[in-house]
Amino acid sequence: HASKITVLICTLPPAARYVAPEAIFSQKPVIFEACYLPPTTALSAAAKDAECVMIQGLDMLIAQGVRQFELWTGVSASKVLGPIDKATRDMYRKTYIEKEEGDKKE
């Protein structure tokens, strides 16, 4: 009898096109995928389809940056999380999402 899987952590490169077996998705684990490019991978698409909670690499990147800023400057993470999160997501969207959408139109 296997234990319930509550978290799946993937650190494979997107080129691996890893997708967990359906038996794992059916357990509705939290899925953490460390990569942040491309914006959508085989795993993140499958996790969304299975309605699993998905934590993407961009979330990790932002959290690491905010914590590092706090350690280096002494400024509380709670004071900078909002602006850093927004600036990073805006840059990511403009650099990768909109570019990818533009490339598809060409």
Image (spheres, rainbow, N blue to C red):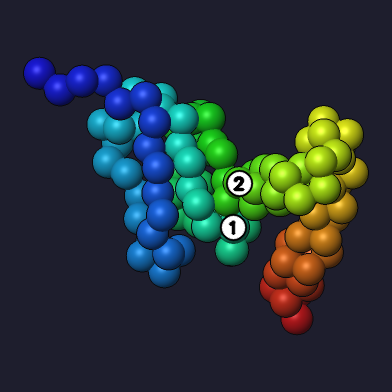
Residue 9 in view, yes or no: yes
Q: Is residue 5 left or right of residue 41?
A: left
- Outermost left residue: 1
First-in-chain label (2 vs 1): 1
**In the image, residue 93 above or below residue 54:** below
Q: Residues within 10 Å of mark 1 (few under 14, many from 20)?
A: some
Q: Is residue 102 left or right of residue 54?
A: right
From the image, which quarter does the C terminus lie in? bottom right
| Of the two numbered discs 2 and 1 in the rendering, the one whose residue sits closer to the viewer | 2
From the image, which quarter does the N terminus lie in? top left
Q: Is residue 104 left or right of residue 47?
A: right
Name which residue lies at 72% across and 45% down: 71
Name which residue lies at 27% across and 20% down: 4
Depth check: give the residue in front, 99 or 32: 32
Depth check: give the residue in front, 100 or 9: 9
Q: Secondary structure at mark 2?
A: helix
Residue highlighted by disc 2:
60
Q: Position of residue 83 (x, y in %)?
A: 89, 44
Residue 81 in view, yes or no: no
Q: Position of residue 103 (x, y in %)?
A: 72, 76
**Disc 2 marks which amino acid?**
Met
Give the Cα distance between marks 2 and 1.
Answer: 9 Å
Place residue 23 in its image quadrant.
top left
Residue highlighted by disc 1:
36
Task: Mark 2 and mark 1 in contact? Answer it, CB < 8 Å.
Answer: yes
Q: Position of residue 37 (x, y in %)?
A: 59, 63
Place residue 81 in its image quadrant.
top right
| Residue 70 numbered tag | none
**Disc 1 marks which amino acid?**
Tyr
Q: Secondary structure at mark 1?
A: loop
